[in-house]
Amino acid sequence: MTFDRVAIVEAALDAVLLQSSPAAAPLAGDAPLRPGSGLTARKAVELFEDQVLSRELDVAARELKKTNRSFYTIGSAGHENNVVLGAQLRINDPAFLHYRSGALMMARARQLPGSTPAFDTLLGIVASREDPIAQGRHKVWGSRPLWVPPQTSTIASHMPKAMGLAFALARARRLGVASDLPDDAIVACSFGDASANHATALSAINTARYAVQIGLPMPILFICEDNGIGISVPTPQGWIEQTFSHMEHLRYDLADGELDEVWDAVAAAVHYVRGARRPAFLHLRTVRLWGHAGSDAEQVYRSVAEIAETEAQDPLLRTARRLIGSGAATPEDLRALVAATRERVMAAAEEATRRPRLETTEEVIAPLAPYHPEQVAARAATPLLDAAARRELHGGTLPEEATLPNARTLAGCLTAALTDELARRPEMIVFGEDVGRKGGVYNVTNGLQKRFGVGRVFDTLLDETSILGIAQGAAHIGLLPVPEIQYLAYLHNAIDQLRGEAASLQFFSSGQFRNPLVVRVPGLAYQKGFGGHFHNDNSVGALRDIPGLVLAVPARGDDAARMLRGCLAMAAEDGRVIVFLEPIALYHEKDLEAEGDGGWLTDYPAPPAFLLPGEVGIYPPPEMTYPDLLIVSYANGLRLSLQAARRLQEDHGIAARVLDLRWLNPLPFEAVRQQAAAIGSVLVVDECRRTGGGVADALIADLAEAEIGRRFGSVRAVDSFVPLGTATSAVLVGVDQIIAAALTAVGGRMRA
Ligand SMILES: Cc1ncc(C[n+]2csc(CCOP(=O)(O)OP(=O)(O)O)c2C)c(N)n1
Ligand SMILES: [Mg+2]
């Protein structure tokens, strides 16, 4: 008994092509394959060729694997009826694809003369840097000219952004943001049957239906490539159909059977989505040949009989028989076609293995975190609003002229900055739960919807995954999204949308696709009398660890306004994904030390003043003595450190300089080193959790490795969830702790 199922399946196709006898009459090229079908004989042969091409790529991947020359063997074998979608969707219908959508990709590329999809795929399989989409960083389906953004391996995670793009199409047009997509473009999104159960899939489908319910266009075709199994776990009989065929605001079409039947079902679904601008669920029946991937021993969980039964349903066999039976082609024609395709693919595979691969670190990370400070600065500086228009925008009083304390808080300055930026950047949109009518839980987006309308400032449904999906999709076509996640703790159930998707897009597309985002996230602890852990989450570990992600954390109103401008410019210019973490407890804080001192109020810096990564805040000692100690902190910790610095000076005669990091990713190491080198003793005041939740480890390690500074200390929050009420002070960093640690640090320095 052999388990070289590849050879068996290949031989079965050969056998069909040898044994089938031609139909009595040849069919003209433009005749329908079956009376009444929209599929012509000529097109059907073309589709068959693309199916075979896709199949042979899978064969080649496995062949090359035997000699360790390929790195990816998840194939499309058995799914090749998706070829029909490749032919019927247009190349300016953005397509977010399942990893088994190979035949779809081959047919899609046929619409672009001169493209070489088979060779491109092979370059991906062998991880060559000539792979035109990922340059060998991953094997993905993707192409800029074919409007196929690359997918990641996280199943279903591409669905929210596909939905988001469908959501954004009409909006971008209405806002006058140009893209290369026509007015009647639709979005296609394929995925597997097991993936259809994933929260992320259901999130996207739910939001698509919700959009219809509230009267918004949502032209998306969800394509479930149903092979009845997910790795080894069978999908229950009838599950996909039962689950998705009776959903309100979701049309359901089954595409099954012969190629021409699939063609007609697909045509109906595409026609519906394009015309109605509403979502449809296309249930495409497929089989999976050769296990999940090359490494999957299918015989462990499937009997040989089952495997053979599945192979008998190979769509290539069916298509070959249909073509021959209908007179669209002769067995000889198809034998020649298959032989030529095999030869072509094998030669191309050999050639692909000779192409260069990424080698250096620089090559690998080149598209990860593009940053062009000069261009970013130029973009931050422009355009400037006409002075009179700006005055009118702000209701007669410019925010920099405001004297009322509420306008000079962190929240007040942020509202003003969002207002100015929305006015300056017509492509910017602001959205999230409660940001529209209510103006945000903490009033930061107050009044924005009234000023800029529901097209640009809007409430979303309660689903962080969809909020970030909408953001990414919108960003794909030139909008500048500023989504809000209501609390840091609630980012975590959607964080893959940043970690796996948004932050990796430029990396896996070699910078050809980008999703510039500034995600506003209220967070961190110290809210007086409110919240417990979930409203006071004090860890940035999950964000700092995302490659390429910028993490900005302002502490004061003037900084917040300038940093927001820098972030928006960085996103717009370099396509960066930025989390703008706003310390909730400081939103409405007015005082630094004593009630009524107004020490935390700032003037609003008029546009275009901005700050960029690396630019830290320096607070000299209260009296201009040579500093004894450098305190490095951020956010709430900055305010506490400034309070501590005052007491250190007054009670102990110690002069502490306080450095506000402002940027927690990338960390401003250079600025810290400079200050540390001059001062010697360094205390890091980190309000986040001790073990990995904050930045103290990284800062101290950097100084130690660079042999800068003589004595280090840190105060950090306890590794605990934050409790409710006054017990918070038992786990969070406090001023007394800072002072005690400062005395120790300075004592060390003095002893040195
Ligand atoms: C979120 C996530 N969980 C688990 C996996 C591992 N995994 C990869 S493919 C797969 C099965 C997917 O099955 P299905 O959606 O039916 O697609 P098929 O491979 O059958 O085409 C699993 C569990 C993953 N990639 N992503
Ligand atoms: Mg499956």
Image: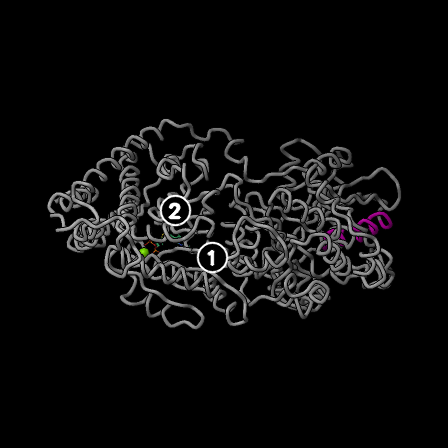
Q: CA distance from mark 1 to mark 2?
A: 15 Å
Q: Secondary structure at mark 1?
A: loop
In the picture, which quadrant includes the N terminus? top left
What's drawn in magenta, residue-wise?
A: 636-651
Q: Which mark is residue 108?
A: 2
| Amino acid type, callout 1 | Ile
Residue contact at pointers 1 and 2, CB within 8 angstroms: no
Instruction: Describe residue 44's horizontal placement relative to residue 104 as left or right.
Output: left
In the picture, which quadrant includes the C terminus? top right
Verify whether residue 413 appears in magenta. Answer: no
Q: Earlier in the sequence, mark 1 or mark 2?
A: 2
Q: In terms of depth relative to the viewer, which is nearer, 690 or 318?
A: 318
Q: In terms of depth relative to the viewer, which is nearer, 281 or 503?
A: 281
Q: Residue at x 51, y 31 (%)?
A: 363
* Residue assigned mark 1: 186
Q: Quadrant of residue 404?
A: bottom right
Which corner quadrant of the figure contains ligand 2? bottom left
